[in-house]
Amino acid sequence: MTVLVINSGSSSIKYQLVDPESGEAIAVGLVEQIGESTSRVKHTYDGEKHEYEQRLADHGEGLRFVLDLFDSVGPSLAEAGIVAVGHRVVQGGDNFNGPALITEDVRDLIEELAPLAPLHNPANLRGIDVARELLDVPHVVVFDTAFFQTLPEEAARYALNREVADRYGVRRYGAHGTSHQYVSHKASEWIGREDLKQIVLHLGNGASVSAVVNGEAVDTSMGLTPLEGLVMGTRTGDIDPAVIFHLSRVAGMSIDELDDLFNKKSGVKGLAGENDMRAVWDMADSGDENAREALDIYVHRLVKYIGSYAAVMGGLDVIAFTAGIGENDDRLRAEVLERLAPFGVKIDPEVNAVRGDNIRAITTADSSVTVLVIPTNEELAIARQTMDVVATLS
Ligand code: AMP
């Protein structure tokens, strides 16, 4: 039994054929530049990477091409045993606190939520619609926001005029929820206890932090959109909203220009000129002061969130690092944890420096907080949640 996991973007479709029981990713692929003169397809199966270039006019053509690939290079659809398709959807608003079987009503709700995620929900829906046409199995949606539906009102509500906020659905929905849920659950399993106060640091190109008490999210750094919170690859994270008024007035920037500036031209890239942390470290090591300062700002923001979430939870048992930077950047982890030494956090530098795909603790046995590195696996989490929904159908 396998689940095809689909993450459909505005001009891309990422997919993975997952065995939800073993956790194995049987085939992995990506269609990019859909609708452009040349689209690119990458499909990896059985250790072999196949690459193609040809025009794929829309998501329907893209997915049809992928399904043909399954038959030509494998695994054949007849033998793949696909029992369901799991779709990632970015914004579930207040409507979804878990995965949902796609029905016409659910589809309409996702469409209605588009104003809250104009770049993402319509793109997600495009993938859902074509996949439903082409694959006659149950389709399940897994929302990036669902894990954060447990946030208490004091964490979810902004101190914005109540009437305006309620009329337009302006509140903190969070994002990366599937990863935060998966990683916090893994941390509990590893420690062998549910009753934990955890901080999960999902540090990838997008980055977010959550506070999790006894398996439930109580706060998170991303807000109405994934712009709030930590310093990210290209996004500002937290910033005085009056900067928008200021730049509009003094620089004459339009809303679209500001959106682009805050989301795509800021963060580590806007500070250092590069957003890949490996390049930023190389630049800092060769004396680039802007790169070093970008790292300092990144670490400062992280330490600030860790301190505030420990206070919000009234204690801290576990910090879990995950995603591209969290899993691989031992120097960054060390800089963050050294700042927590006054609170009894004791990093084990040798274990921290070891690379690996396994969950590992990087603090010493007498550290006040256990710090773990946990590889995230959003596709597997989506596949498993999809199977949970399918199991309720019979
Ligand atoms: P993600 O969004 O989770 O795929 O993470 C992507 C980011 O991880 C990249 O932009 C890099 O900045 C970062 N990354 C990946 N490998 C490393 C590494 N070995 N050291 C530092 N950063 C890394």
Image (tube, rainbow, N blue to C red):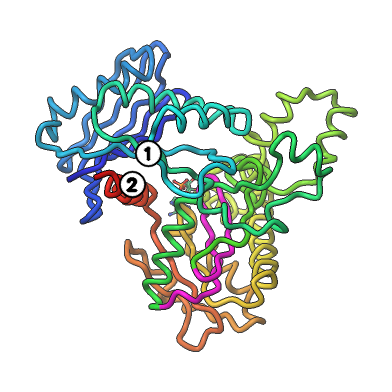
Could you tell me which residue is drawn at 65 percent across and 67 percent down?
309
Residue 353, how many percent across, how many down?
Answer: 42, 69
- Is residue 377 shown in magenta? no
Magenta highlight on residue 203 = yes
Q: Secondary structure at mark 1?
A: strand
Q: Residues within 10 Å of mark 1 (few under 14, many from 20)?
A: some
**What label sits on residue 169 in the rendered view?**
none
Three-letter code for the amino acid on which mark 1 is drawn: Leu
In the rendered image, residue 369, in percent from the top left (x then y), is placed at 54, 79
Q: Amino acid at mark 2?
A: Val
Numbered circle sitting on residue 389: 2
Q: Is residue 106 above or below residue 227?
A: above
Span of residues in magenta: 193-214
- Residue 275: x and y in percent read 56, 43
Give the dominant element type of the magenta stretch: helix, strand or loop.
Answer: strand
Task: Report which residue position mark 1 lands on.
Answer: 101
Q: Is residue 28 above or below residue 305?
A: above
Q: Is residue 93 above or below residue 336?
A: above
Note whether ligand 1 is within 8 Å of mark 1. no
Q: Nearer the viewer, residue 14 or 79?
A: 79
Name the N-terminal-most of marks 2 and 1.
Answer: 1
